[in-house]
Amino acid sequence: MNPPSAPDIYKDVPGAEVVFNAVAGEKSYLWSRNLTATSVSALKSGDNIGMTFAVRCQYSSGSALPQGAETGAYWAANLVPPGETSLAPGLRWLFQAPTTATYKCRLSVTSYSSIINNDRQVTMRIPAGAELGRLAVGSGATRWTLPTASATTVARGTTATTLGYTYTPTDGKQTTIVQDANLTTCVAGSRICAGGTSAYQGTEAETWIEAQPQMPNGDPCGGPIKGPVAKWSIPDAKHHQAATNTLNITKTQLGGCTQIRASLKVKDTAGNPVYIHAGHASEQIAATHGLAYTL
């Protein structure tokens, strides 16, 4: 599931925006803080409300960025009540100013799928305190997005290696690598991905970042560095889950290695296949993306 195609369906989260001046090419790391969504209405089993949260950037005047420019990234998931009545999104994005100007980036939210019976209406609430953090990072910071053609389905018992990028750290003590993927379980008869059967009621998956230090010619330099393993349970009712991953590598760990080949590992440990989304939703908002910076 991707966010709606109409930009005006989004609602901006009050107080969760940053306005700043930037010269062309200047880069800023953006991340959500204290962002949650909870149900106000009583939810029943089967009320699997889907919510999409996004970082969206534009000129401070309200004008859109130049055509083709990526504007942000999204995080999406469904609620599975009665056991689950809130979501805690984690959004990260590296903004690069296309021109010298004043910009506004903000957190936004929309409902992309509501399964509510008998014409009932439900209300979700975002508590006060949500913020969008901003950190100016050097010119060596970079981001990458999984292209549409690289969307793939991961079969049960297999591991996909995706979102690969070779990053050259700048001078600093620590490199941070972020790899965030939007995943969907392949239910039986899915219009999104094939291979699902009614024998399973969802997918169990693991994700992690693998970083292979390299020399300038691309030869391996020491062994790969494995990031923390995140576990994701995506039952049919949840359907969609954004999987966030972070790996910090110190300068000492790299030794004399000058490059890092970063990849995202997605392992389907049980259940139906899992689909890795790619490309962009409306407004050039990235689905599965990575970024890296050194400080």
Image: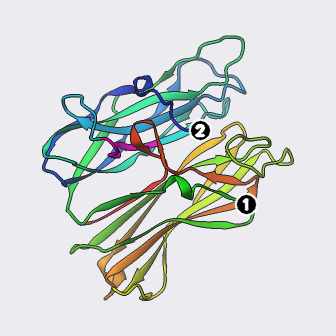
x%, y% of residue 259? 35, 79
Question: Could you tell whether 221 is left or right of 200 in the image?
Answer: left
| Residue neighbourhood size for the residue with mark 1, other residues' Cα within 10 Å, grouped as few (<14), some (14–19), many (≥20) | many
Instruction: Name the image quarter holding residue 214.
Output: bottom left
Label annotation for residue 1: 2
Which residue type does callout 1 highlight? Answer: Ala
Q: Is residue 156 above or below residue 182?
A: below
SS for callout 1? loop
Please give the name of the residue rendered at 38% of the width and 76% of the height, measured from the top-left corner.
260
Residue that lies at the very extreme toward the right in this rendered image: 199
Q: Is residue 150 above or below residue 55?
A: below
Image quadrant containing the N terminus: top right
Label annotation for residue 263: none
Residue that lies at the very extreme toward the front in this rendered image: 67
Q: Is 107 inside the magenta-drawn segment?
A: no
Residue position marked by numbered label 1 in the rendering: 155
Please give the name of the residue rendered at 67% of the width and 20% of the height, measured from the top-left corner.
116
Instruction: Name the image quarter holding residue 47.
Output: top right
Task: Give the magenta range.
Answer: 67-74
